[in-house]
Image (tube, rainbow, N blue to C red):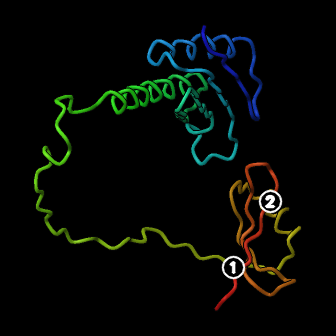
Amino acid sequence: MAFEVEIYGRSMDVNDRIQDYVTKKVSKLDRYLPGIEEARVDLAYVKSARSSADRQVAQITVRGKGFILRSEERADDIFAALDTALDKMQRQIERYKGKRNRGRGDGKSAAEVAEVVVEEEQEERPPVIVRRKQFRLSPMNEYEAIEQMQLLGHENFFIFYNADTNAVNVLYRRRDGDYGLIEPEID
């Protein structure tokens, strides 16, 4: 194995069986792309996923000189999620290699090869709102909003009416686990 495979588990135990399986499968990526220097595999159990088939998450990040490739898949079994993420990674590697190796190869400049392309005017479709939600906001302070967000199992964001500022705010979880607060101002 020419590169290091780092395995991290979030909200789950990465036992020896999983670790051996991941190392064995991910180390084979070197066959498809020899320049891999490091591979990171993040395995997670997401309890609050809407569907039980989306609770096991496998994310693979491959780094090498001049490239970073990432794939993520969800399934009801961690092994199935990992296998699907590996298949996706192999397709990304093939696409990356194709972009690197693709070219005209005949030595002609782009100006010589370029054809005049007549663009057809296509009618642009405006964005469509496919779902609307309405809910009542109860006045609360920032700490109550954090507690409510955790109780409801919202992982990304929570909208609330801030009793201290008399305004609607958005509370969101940052990647480092802390929280951020968006306080909109009207012009």
Classify residue 58 as left or right of residue 165: left
Q: Which mark is residue 179?
A: 2
Dot 2: within a 10 Å radius of its alpha carbon, few (fewer than 14), some, or many (20 or more) residues?
A: few
Q: Look at the picture and state if 124 lies above or below 19.
A: below
Going by the numbered disc 2, the residue's amino acid type is: Tyr
Task: Between label 2 and label 1, give the one nearer the viewer.
Answer: 2
Residue at 89% x, 67% y: name it. 143
**Number of marks present in the image shown:** 2
Dot 1: within a 10 Å radius of its alpha carbon, few (fewer than 14), some, or many (20 or more) residues?
A: few
Q: Look at the picture and state if 136 lies above or below 119.
A: below
Can you tell which quarter of the image residue 157 is in?
bottom right
Q: To which residue does mark 1 refer?
A: 136
Classify residue 175 as left or right of residue 49: right
Classify residue 10 as left or right of residue 129: right
Classify residue 58 as left or right of residue 100: right
Q: Look at the picture and state if 5 lies above or below 95.
A: above
Can you tell which quarter of the image residue 152 is in?
bottom right
Can you tell which quarter of the image residue 146 is in?
bottom right
Q: Position of residue 38 (x, y in %)?
A: 63, 22
Residue at 56% x, 25% y: name it. 82
Q: Position of residue 171 (x, y in %)?
A: 75, 67
Q: Position of residue 51 (x, y in %)?
A: 57, 44
Q: Which of the two residues, 155 or 93, is positioned nearer the viewer here? A: 93
Q: Secondary structure at mark 2?
A: strand
Q: Which of the two residues, 51 or 32, is positioned nearer the viewer here? A: 32
Mark 2 / mark 1, whichever is N-terminal: 1
Residue at 16% x, 69% y: name it. 121
Going by the numbered disc 1, the residue's amino acid type is: Arg
Q: Secondary structure at mark 1?
A: loop
Q: Position of residue 83 (x, y in %)?
A: 51, 22
Q: Which of the two residues, 83 or 116, is positioned nearer the viewer here? A: 116
